Amino acid sequence: MIKESPASPVFILFSILTTFFIVFRRAITAKAFDVDVLLIGNIILVAITLASFFMQLKGLRSTTTAAFLRAIYGGFIIKFFVVAALVFGYAYFVSGKINKPSLFTLMGLYLLYTFVETRALMKMSKRIKNG
């Protein structure tokens, strides 16, 4: 039997969203979305979500409370500041011509990835017995 990765829900969500953006590219573009921004943003969101997930998973497996809290807060802070820096960088490089529908969609995807990550970590916390 193949053991399922704890990050499988994140990969599944990423695959579904990427496929959706590629298949319905014309329809999405017709609604004033920039599909390239959505695809790049989705890749970046999944990368920082996985980095945060594995950092928090390591903290979950830790035996000390300080290490657990450091991992949880560290994962949140890294995600938050990387996303904030990317939004400001995007605004700077496009010289104020921000594609708001795509940006707000990516904000929603940030919340969705955070929900999936938290749910996977909650399931893992029930399996891990460390005292």
Image (tube, grey):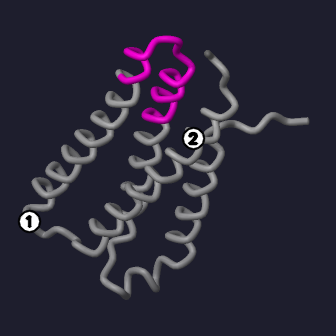
Q: Position of residue 39 (x, y in %)?
A: 43, 60
Q: Residue at x 60, y 33 (%)?
A: 125
Asked if disc 1 and disc 2 are in contact, CB closer than 8 Å, the reply is no
Judge left or right: residue 11 versus residue 50.
right
The residue stretch that appears in magenta: 51-69
Q: Considering the image in quadrants, where does the N terminus appear?
A: top right
Residue 122: numbered disc: 2
For label 1, the SS is loop
Q: Quadrant of residue 23?
A: bottom right
49 or 65: nearer the viewer: 65
Q: In this view, which residue lies farthest toward the right?
A: 1
Q: Residues within 10 Å of mark 2 (few under 14, many from 20)?
A: few
Q: In this view, which residue lies farthest toward the top?
A: 64
Q: Residues within 10 Å of mark 1 (few under 14, many from 20)?
A: few
68 or 9: nearer the viewer: 68
Judge left or right: residue 122 versus residue 66.
right
Q: Position of residue 67 (x, y in %)?
A: 41, 15
Mark 1 highlights which residue? Answer: 96
Q: Residue at x 60, y 48 (%)?
A: 11
Q: Residue at x 47, y 29 (%)?
A: 56
Which residue type does callout 2 highlight?
Met
Which residue type does callout 1 highlight?
Gly
